[in-house]
Image (cartoon, helix red, strand yellow):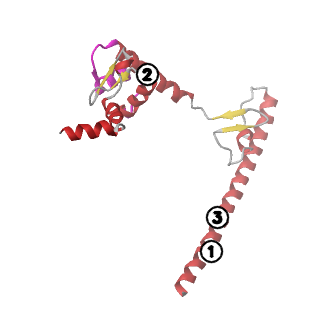
Amino acid sequence: MNERMALKIRLEQLEDAEIRVIQEFQKERENIFKRLRELDENEGQQVKASGKPEYVSFNALASVSPETSGGEALTNERKVRKSRSSKKGRSGKMREEAIQILKNVSEPIRGAELQRMIEEKTGYKIANMTSFMKSVEKLDPRIRKPDRGLYEFVNDTANTEEPHQEMEQNENLPEENEAVTEQK
């Protein structure tokens, strides 16, 4: 009982210490933001006096609470966003290039060769070819993987059903499976 009580007391002490540390960090952050605002105001007055073009000030970012989510912050001055379009554009270009290469090749192509061709044409590196090709397969159902490390473009979408899907369909029919096992 004594050890249990001591542990509970220690947990309460730790919680109090955590709260104090968090409050100290918040105070320090507020002081830094306050000083940065003052510096921005001083620079803004100097810019207006000199007639140079005005740039986005730190005030737009400093007025945003830390709880703001999604990388968006609305302020009176401007709307500030985190940019994600370059990554989407890059992967989209790479996927489109993969589809074009597979369309132009008449037989299955090795993943390593396909990766090299995509990287040469786009100038971007593929970190994980398997996951990249899974995203390409989702984008275009005519892309399929006939064997390990091979990819191909199939013009006829009716023949793209995988063999394991046929097996799953057969498992759903218990009467047929029982009849097959009885014959054996």
| Percent x, y of residue 96 | 44, 19
Q: Which numbered disc, 3 or 2, marks the residue that appears first in the sequence? A: 3
Q: Amino acid at mark 3?
A: Val
Occupied quadrant, residue 178:
top left
Q: Pick the residue in front: 6 or 151.
A: 151
Q: Amino acid at mark 1?
A: Glu
Q: CA distance from mark 1 to mark 2?
A: 57 Å
Q: CA distance from mark 3 to mark 1?
A: 14 Å
In the image, taking residue 6 as reference, residue 56 lies left or right, namely right
What residue is at 69 percent from the left and 53 percent from the top?
29
What residue is at 28 percent from the left and 20 percent from the top?
108
Q: Which residue is mark 3?
A: 21
| Percent x, y of residue 154 | 34, 17
**Residue 147 inside the magenta-drawn segment:** no
Q: CA distance from mark 3 to mark 2?
A: 52 Å
Indicate which disc residue 140 carries.
2
| Percent x, y of residue 151 | 31, 24
Occupied quadrant, residue 112:
top left
| Percent x, y of residue 32 | 70, 51
**Residue 109 inside the magenta-drawn segment:** yes
What residue is at 41 percent from the left and 23 percent from the top?
141
Q: Amino acid at mark 2?
A: Asp
Question: SS at mark 1?
Answer: helix
